[in-house]
Amino acid sequence: MGTLLSSPRKPQSLLLFLLFVFPQIINASVLAIDYGADFTKVSLMKPGVPFDVVLNRDSKRKIASSVAWKGEERLFGSDAVNIAARFPSTSYSSLKFLQGTEYGTTPSQFHALIQPALDVSEVPDRKTHRFKRKDGESWTNEELVAMQFSYVKDLAEDVAGERVRDAVVTVPAYYSQFERQAVLDSLELAGLKGLALINDGTAIAINYALSRNFPTLENHIIYDAGASGVRATLVSFHTVTTVPESKSKSKSAKGSDVTHVTVLGYGYDRVASGSEMDLRLREVLQQKFETAHMRGGSLTGEHRAIAKLWKEAARAKTILSANTESRVSIESFHDDIDFRATVTRAEFEEACADLTPRFTRPIQDALTDAKLELSDITSIVLAGGASRVPLVQTAIKVTFGEDKIAHNVNADEAAVLGAAFYGASLSSRFKTKEIKIQDRHVLPEIQLSFTGETKRGKRLLNTALFPPGSKYGTKKTASYRKKDDFELSFRYQQKMGSELIPEIFDAEFYGVKAAMKNLTSRGAVEPLMKVEVGLNESGMLVIHDAWAYGEVKDESITGKIKNFFAGSSSSSASASEETEESATEVTESETPTETEEAPEPTPTTTPATVPVSHRISHKGVLPYTKKQISAARTRLIAVENAEKLRHKKEEARNMLEGYLYRMRDLLAGEPTSPFMLYSKEEERQKLEQRMSEAFALIHEGDEGELAELWRRREEMETIEKPIQFRYEENEAAPKELTNLQQAIHAGKSFLESALQNRTMEESEGLPHKYTLEELEHIKESILETEKWLQDGIEEQKKLLKNDDPVLISAEMKARGVTLQNYVMKLLKRKTPKPPAPKKEKEVPVPPTDAEEEVVADTKDESQHPIHQEL
Ligand SMILES: *[C@@H]1O[C@H](CO)[C@@H](O)[C@H](O)[C@H]1NC(C)=O
Ligand SMILES: *[C@@H]1O[C@H](CO)[C@@H](O)[C@H](O)[C@H]1NC(C)=O
Ligand SMILES: *[C@@H]1O[C@H](CO)[C@@H](O)[C@H](O)[C@H]1NC(C)=O
């Protein structure tokens, strides 16, 4: 036995399809989040950044979906998981189960089993979950999820090197309007914009299609066994080569390939899940301990022990996937008792026996849904962490045949990478491989109901709007005869035993009377109210538009001319129509309705519309209102800012502490140490005093504000700086002194030579190279510098090492450079041309060796003595 899992291969190459991604504009990152009950995977699409999953701070590819508090400190990922056993009442995980669910329902109870230490209550106005901490602070489920989104956003921003705003999040296809809304709300709370939600099975299908071509149509079932449920998505893949329109001029005669990814069927189970298996295993472990150590007692209610077992169960499940038994060893587990036990795969499988059929059932359901046979399916592609559990794999193999099983996507990362690609394809800032995705509604039929006036009084009328299998992106228009404001209700068809909240929202249309009057006053007979409703690409029901519609008299010039010839026929076409208000038709927008095609369009009328406003009142788990969003966002930002401030303070505190230790060492140094030699007794006393004050503050943990920490360090640095300076001067001054002396010497030589030349020039009647003023200036500079230096040297001699120096290296250098630059400027000057030579004397004089040498000297500055010295 002992089925060893074949390790899932990565798709051939991630780089392969990166080739299809050409950056168009920069600053265009798209974040993809695969938010699971156990782990979150994140990916970033940014031109120039390798397309991959985003790593967490410990370079892990998956991030535990947890947030926890240890006192003031907020932790995420594995840091949060690691403290869960010590702080069970402030550690939050498995929050996915509570997204958009009503308090007290099955998922709510299941979550309470997993995390019994939490103080959960109902958010009164929104019917969903809120967690209260001992300090009185409370956070809703959406807010805790938003914190995790915000955390991964920060990680992605580090990679992107810019702000990341647009995000795509994976959701199970069975997520209802409320659950989807909860995800969108969390995104908004995290400061992200939900570009779209994508069903996780579809995301995996996209990832599957990225590195493959399907010249002939293939059907695959994407089987995703996650921590929160199992889903089977039956998808057809087909790559079609479109022939370019004009063959003649296009650069390449090749057509472009479009891969169609179409969801045909779906099956799921929200109980069979990785978490349910963990729970069963936790119960096995709990029982083992109770039997061995508690003599009839129970661990239930022992939150820390239960939290430890939860972590241990997850670990054991992983080990049991590759081994037939797993050892448990937890030191000082409960009441100072160590817990040592062995749990076998057989025990685990027995505990999960009733779940086994639930793991395979969704595959059959997907086939039934798509009206296909197993033989129509090329493979069952396994994905999701729980698909590694032998119990699950064996069940699928036994039921559907080993040859159908494929491990050709990365079980953990396929969904997030597919979602990232999808996000990029939406954003129009990327050019991507062409994949056309068609997803579908898998929940019960969405119905539209309204109260109509019939002859027998008011009656609730239901109309099918989006039956299961409806395509995402579909729009439908409903037409009504209405004279006044009215209300429509949207709901899921209620199924026996289902906990799906039926009512989605009511929409109230107002200003109808005026709109109708507008049309009738323009000659319309029995205008209609039209409402356009859609199932958008995120799988959500939306009201796109509402308007009044009628055929009005054509008031345009052409209309009037037509009117004239037609002889103003206003014979009403619909005199015989019922005056009863009823839904006349619900149609796909693309195909015009019968009512829209008015009976025999007369040339005298023209269609007209008047927009009508609507208000939505949500049902079930209510979305955050704009006001609630901004209030929660303010709170979340305050937490983040406080955290940043704490981190800065921590940093400042560490810097001060480091500085204090260094200072303590300096003050305790040998009498011959530079610090001792160059510091004065009083300075050391001051430093000593400030140091012990600061140490005391830090040790008492009462260091005050961030600014106070910096101030203390700066204060000591101000005292220390002159000591440092004296030491550095002592090192630097001798060299600068020599340099300056050499500059003076070089200046003197220049002056001497220039004066000699001047005499020569005068005697030969040649023009002067330098003016007298220039030479005078050099002379004065030299004399002044020499005097300054002499005085300085005298002064300096009288000083001790720990006195502040008078002859400062920087000043010596500045003076030397000034003198040098002036001399260099003059030296570079060209020798002026002698006055026009007399005709008789035209014998060219060959240059002497000496002359050549001097020319070379002036040209090559680095060779010049002054330059060389300084
Ligand atoms: C779908 O509708 C929801 C609810 O109105 C909206 O928040 C979301 O942005 C829409 N998504 C897309 C992709 O259009
Ligand atoms: C009727 O509605 C149209 C479109 O909104 C508007 O332009 C027009 O002014 C309205 N006419 C009357 C008479 O209210
Ligand atoms: C003086 O003249 C000699 C010979 O022409 C020349 O090489 C030298 O550079 C001159 N001195 C100065 C300071 O210009």
Image (tube, rainbow, N blue to C red):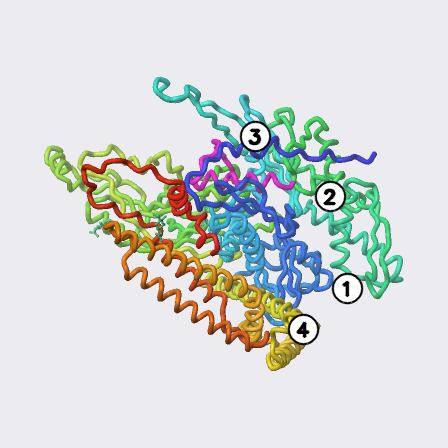
**Residue 281 as seen in the image, left or right of residue 205:** right
Distance (Cα) linking label 2 and label 4 = 66 Å
Which amino acid type is shown beneath numbered disc 3? Ser
The magenta stretch is: 412-441
Distance (Cα) linking label 4 and label 3 = 63 Å
Q: Which mark is residue 302?
A: 1
Percent across and percent down for residue 206 are 55, 35
Mark whose residue sits in front, 4 or 1: 4
Question: Is 600 or 814 nearer to us in this picture?
Answer: 814
Kindly state the secondary structure of the residue where label 2 is placed.
Answer: helix
First in sequence: mark 2 vs mark 3: 3
Which amino acid type is shown beneath numbered disc 1? Glu
Query: Are discs 2 and 3 less than 8 Å apart at CB?
Result: no
Category of crowding for the residue at label 2, using alpha-carbon neighbours closer than 10 angstroms: few (below 14), some (14–19), many (at least 20): some
On the question of residue 189 being in view, the answer is yes
First in sequence: mark 4 vs mark 1: 1
Percent across and percent down for residue 413 are 62, 41
Percent across and percent down for residue 778 are 35, 62
Question: Is 67 or 404 nearer to us in this picture?
Answer: 67
Q: Quadrant of the N terminus?
A: top right
Residue positioned 14% across, 36% down in the render: 558
